[in-house]
Amino acid sequence: MKTRRSLSKIFKRGFSCRGKRRSMKDAIKCSQEILAEFSIGGFFYEARKRNFVISSGKRAVMTLAALNDIDFATYNPQQKLYITSVIWRLPDLLRSYQSRCIEFGADSDLYAEFAADVNKLVHSIMERLLDNRHQQNPEKVHLLFHTHVFDDDNEDEKLIGVFSSKLNADTARLKASELPGFRDHLAGFHIEEYDIDRMEWSEGFATV
């Protein structure tokens, strides 16, 4: 119970420290610290090895809480995309490690509580990263395609989605790149920008 109370304080801190403006250097530092948790001795490294280390888990959560404390209003799409690429899979990874860690002695209730609260923190950060309404241009859309070229040079082009900003299209590309088929042909992704209410084909066509 003592461990659970200390975790709750960290999570509460993560959600209450809003509105402070920090530099991109702070966000990069937080992101690099999260990535370091996948190295030897890091929380996600140990969890993948079936070892749920609560002390390093607290460290990872404090880093997420610090990232949740950053105001992203002035960040450009590339900066937001970098942070998104670091954190968006963390809840899924925790879920995938859960059964193995519990099998090797982790407290199931504590792990579930920990994973749920990490999910809340990541969701909170992602919501604000993608809340880029001030950067969106309502007169333009971004289309995300994937093209697969077969051995006979025939092509299969898929429209994955239509997005209001380049950042949202890039985020969708990251998610799609984890899916079967797409992950084996990453070079096939491309994003195209189109103006709304403008004809892209104005010369007609002829058959021969």
Image: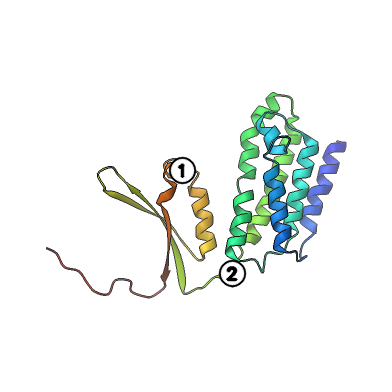
Q: How many marks?
A: 2
Q: Residue at x 75, y 64 (%)?
A: 22
Numbered tag placed on residue 94 in the rendering? none
Q: Is residue 68 left or right of residue 188?
A: right
Q: Residue at x 28, y 42 (%)?
A: 151
Depicted 180 relative to depicted 51: above or below: below
Is 72 in front, or is 107? 72
Q: Secondary structure at mark 2?
A: helix
Residue 202 position within the rendered picture, expressed as x and y whole percent measured from the top left: 27, 75
Neighbourhood count class around disc 2 (C-alpha, 10 Å): few under 14, some 14–19, many 20 upward: few
Give the position of the C terminus as an image quadrant.
bottom left
Q: Mark 1 or 2, which is nearer the eye?
A: 1
* Earlier sequence position, callout 1 versus callout 2: 2
Q: Residue at x 76, y 30 (%)?
A: 107
Neighbourhood count class around disc 1 (C-alpha, 10 Å): few under 14, some 14–19, many 20 upward: some
Residue 203 position within the rendered picture, expressed as x and y whole percent measured from the top left: 24, 74
Residue at numbered disc 2: 133
Q: Residue at x 76, y 35 (%)?
A: 110
Q: Secondary structure at mark 1?
A: helix
Q: What amino acid is labelled 2 in the image? A: Arg
Depicted 76 relative to depicted 59: above or below: below
Residue 46 position within the rendered picture, expressed as x and y whole percent measured from the top left: 70, 33
Numbered tag placed on residue 183 in the rendering? 1
Calculate the distance from the C-alpha at mark 1 to the C-alpha at mark 2.
30 Å
Q: How are the colours assigned in the image?
A: rainbow
